[in-house]
Amino acid sequence: MTSVSTPPRYAYLGPEGTFSQAALLSLPQAKAAELVPAVTVADALDAVRRGDADGALVPFENSVEGSVPRTLDELSSGTPLRIACEILLPVSFALMARPGTSLGDVRTIATMSHAESQVRGWLRSHIPDARFVASSSTAEGARLVAAGQFDGAVGDALAADIYGLDVLARDIQDNDGAVTRFVLAVPPGDVPPQTGADKTSLVCYIADDHAGALLEILTEFAVRGVNLTRIESRPTGEGLGRYSFSIDCEGHIDEARMGEALSALHRICEDVRFLGSYARADGAAPTVRRATADGDFAEAAAWLARLRGTDLP
Amino acid sequence: MTSVSTPPRYAYLGPEGTFSQAALLSLPQAKAAELVPAVTVADALDAVRRGDADGALVPFENSVEGSVPRTLDELSSGTPLRIACEILLPVSFALMARPGTSLGDVRTIATMSHAESQVRGWLRSHIPDARFVASSSTAEGARLVAAGQFDGAVGDALAADIYGLDVLARDIQDNDGAVTRFVLAVPPGDVPPQTGADKTSLVCYIADDHAGALLEILTEFAVRGVNLTRIESRPTGEGLGRYSFSIDCEGHIDEARMGEALSALHRICEDVRFLGSYARADGAAPTVRRATADGDFAEAAAWLARLRGTDLP
Amino acid sequence: MTSVSTPPRYAYLGPEGTFSQAALLSLPQAKAAELVPAVTVADALDAVRRGDADGALVPFENSVEGSVPRTLDELSSGTPLRIACEILLPVSFALMARPGTSLGDVRTIATMSHAESQVRGWLRSHIPDARFVASSSTAEGARLVAAGQFDGAVGDALAADIYGLDVLARDIQDNDGAVTRFVLAVPPGDVPPQTGADKTSLVCYIADDHAGALLEILTEFAVRGVNLTRIESRPTGEGLGRYSFSIDCEGHIDEARMGEALSALHRICEDVRFLGSYARADGAAPTVRRATADGDFAEAAAWLARLRGTDLP
Amino acid sequence: MTSVSTPPRYAYLGPEGTFSQAALLSLPQAKAAELVPAVTVADALDAVRRGDADGALVPFENSVEGSVPRTLDELSSGTPLRIACEILLPVSFALMARPGTSLGDVRTIATMSHAESQVRGWLRSHIPDARFVASSSTAEGARLVAAGQFDGAVGDALAADIYGLDVLARDIQDNDGAVTRFVLAVPPGDVPPQTGADKTSLVCYIADDHAGALLEILTEFAVRGVNLTRIESRPTGEGLGRYSFSIDCEGHIDEARMGEALSALHRICEDVRFLGSYARADGAAPTVRRATADGDFAEAAAWLARLRGTDLP
């Protein structure tokens, strides 16, 4: 009798043909894995929470449209999850339709609202009369087009293969150079080791809504030389003017300056949710300010221990 | 021949029956005005920019869903507009359908994505199999339901009257106490006078993306005792990690501390777009920190002028 | 033959009859000790450095005259010493002369320059023609008067007994309520345990003379809720504009917020000289800001250790 | 009858032969002036306050000994005076004695305490048994030596000429490169015009002794890009822990960033005493940080005025 290992199982924001699937396929660990489409970001993440999937690949932010609020909010609440890695994909939209459809025939266009706003200029100038219909994903738009409900879909050209559509136009995005960032969310556990070019994500909930709470948070990072790469406020749902802050910063939780900054936030915030430390997709090494490298912290800790007459921590 | 004055004309995010229309109707100046629905936030604002409307009433943020990115982005770019006033409406959603439809018949629900996320809990527990279809506004959803395209609409109950629908359920929002904030955008011109309980809105574009730019911006406010009530980062579209900051703060541009803070931001930022000073809808008076009242600034200016041997500014 | 333990030996800024001697006599540990006058502050401290004394009692600052630069500079350089405790003495000056001298006979007054400036008003109004002659201490002035070199001495009335002088006037200080602070300097070793009302003294040398170095130092304290009670710049002797900062702050090195602040200073400064943690003479308990108590730091450290998957430090 | 103009009259810390006199003689305006020695710094300044002198030349700080507390305190209180200019003199001390005295004969050395500490090393190694006697100035020491009261004087070699002494040794200062800074104090009036390399001096009294008052003061400078070149705390005489801050900074009161910073300090401090803007003796041009030049402030003021619909200040 032989023992067999189960292949890993990854959920992604589906249906088949989404950019999320494309991002997932770019990961080595997805090669031998079972890939499961989910209808919504929440469904994909819940599959991990329930143990039905080992990870969930979901869109996080886009250089044109900003963050995906649903992803931010789902990661910020509920059973904790961790970001295991990030993937950057250049945005490339295709207009797809059922075989035989010409550009002039397209009256309704089904796509995700994030996608629509990135091709609006092209659509206005080429098919100004076409009406946008929101679908829950770009691939779902393609599926609805294949099902005959709408005329055209805007999304990844791979969806054309999957749903038997023709590509009427490629690279119709208004903003060349746009990039979408995806993350792979996994159950909490060991943090991936430092790579030298890492990012840390977290969410800070402020204890009371005193003026200057954000200034305090930023100061805790600044004083320890930790650079932020993204900060966004999100309503907590408890009334206008009540926010949490979703933050990405350069560095890894195992680095001393990051650890001290996170601890400080834990002290001053009502709650801090650590969303993970992981390799940066762009491989950019952090700027380490004078006197904030691990060696500087270690030397200072040794000095303090000597003064206190204690052993080193 | 007698001279007649033309009544003012206000655009709002339509179609008829939206919360934006309800918000507009709450304004005294709308009583005798011509109210014109617009298909999108951009269309409503562009009507003002073109001179086709004297103002545009659009949704700005929601205590559950956060800001309306489209409104933020449209106000932040293009021909400048000003916020003349803000309106707060408690969120109250109704489920509407064509007469004769029972709850069990509702398979598709057309509403705005912002609205859907605020009634998701109710929908899951009452009609778990109903599918959400995104419409460009809640009233547009009602219109599509009246036209027979979908089964149910979620929005302001007034839309039922307008489109001949029945209300199947009222107050189905998951989060009681939710509030939506609307603004009336007008052409630049005279700023409304101080009321003693004012708010100022602006957008800051940072000159280069140096770490600490946001900390600098917050410090310019803090050092002059100006409290922020909202701050949100928005991508500039020039790449991940590039943001502008959309800010509301307590006080009026004619107040000294606010004027000095705005001037400082104008110096250190690549661009600052002033979106207006206007009365707070909640009438809350600002907290004025020690030494930051107009009298304090006037006394300091007089002292400086004496030292410099110049006349007072 | 029996073994005898040697009594401790303390140096003080002499000669006999100085306020420093009075301060030393107020300490319990001085009761059975040998007390040795030293001619200068440097001599007193050097006696400890050479091992000829177990401690040195020297004046540190005065609420009217400010710090004693010589003491600050001697503690800041050379072989390190520690402050074991502080003593506060109310300032009370007497005018003393040889028996038979009347006020009108006093033409020359020998005293320390620090003392002279605190009785100047009284001298001007009572003996305006008397000339001040600087002596190295108030008691040395009394000794010189006894030796017949000068007419009057200003100092602690105890000196009158010691040197056989009469007290012509008591409490002649211009500023009632003035206080002098003395410190007992000892060899480096174990820091006295926390008492709940402690002070920590240190000297910071800045690495390069960049603008904002002092702001950085103060921010490291402020961000961790450590209050300063004294900060003074002293020239380093390397040119105008080059300073070190002599600092007293509330709290004990064994407290977490103080330890983290000291470590941060060690990282960012060229050098930090720890001068000791010791009980406050006034017994005033520190103000502990929200989220900066030892328990807050411990909880944050435990949280970080869990996230890192490491044992607690 | 002809009208004659009276030559100006300047007081200096005397008697004749002090470094203060040497500094005064380096000023062009002193050439045709009447120079009047004063016994103390206070006397020199009071002569200006009473109208008996047009200016007073007094020592301010020394790169080895630090500031001259008496000068700082006298300028900080009483009838206001202004610093019209600063003079830097390299420190060069000579040992002087009556003709016929050899080094071995010198048992007592009369000089100012500031001077003594700068030649202590030389004295220790060359005439270890000589005793220091404090005089109110270096020249007064020379005068006393000439009068036969003491054996040697330490001061400017010019004093030897004036008092008929011989120079036993030149350049006996321990620290080569030491510099003393003098200031010319005048009655308040027009501030000297900008030169492009100016310094501004002031004294800040804090309103209440809250922790962080100094941090606030420094932040007001930092946020407007004003660099400090000297900051010193001085006791206010109201008890330990109560300080004023004596500050020099780069720039001129007529510059916008300086004016705004001074006004801010006037608002937040209990009192701010402006001690003058004047040309730097070293001619070093200030570092002007991005966005803090006068043009930046003018542009921001014009922008604000347009927004407010007011005329420019």
Image: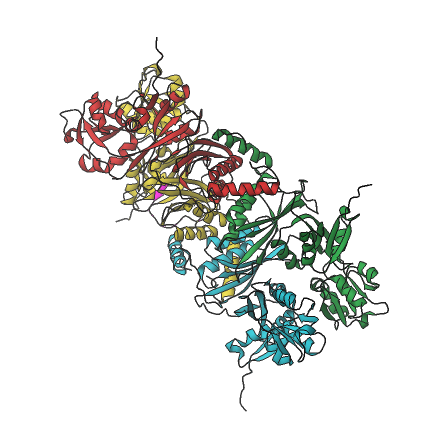
Chain colours: A green, B cyan, C red, D yellow
Quarter holding the C terminus of chain C is top right
Instruction: From the viewer's side, name the closer residue of D25 and B49.
Output: B49
- Of all residues, the one furthest to the front in this rendering is A1
Query: Is residue A157 among the parts visible in the rendering?
Result: no
- Of all residues, the one furthest to the top in this rendering is C1
Query: Is residue B253 among the parts visible in the rendering?
Result: yes
Residue B25 occupies which quadrant of the picture?
bottom right
Report the magenta residues as a range. Answer: D184-194
Quarter holding the N terminus of chain C is top left
Residue at 50%, 41% in the rendered image: C297
Task: Classify A146 as above or below D24.
Answer: below
Task: Classify A20 as above or below C224.
Answer: below
Which x, y percent locates residue C133?
A: 26, 28
Is B27 magenta? The answer is no
Task: Classify B144 as above or below C209.
Answer: below
How many numbered marks have been drawn onto this rendered protein structure?
0
Which x, y percent locates residue A126?
A: 77, 69
Instruction: From the viewer's side, name the closer residue of A293 and A29.
Output: A29
Instruction: From the viewer's side, name the closer residue of A43 and B300.
Output: A43
Left or right: A197 in relation to C294:
right
The kind of secondary structure the magenta stretch mainly shows is: loop
Which x, y percent locates residue D286?
A: 50, 44
Task: Classify B124 as above or below D103.
Answer: below
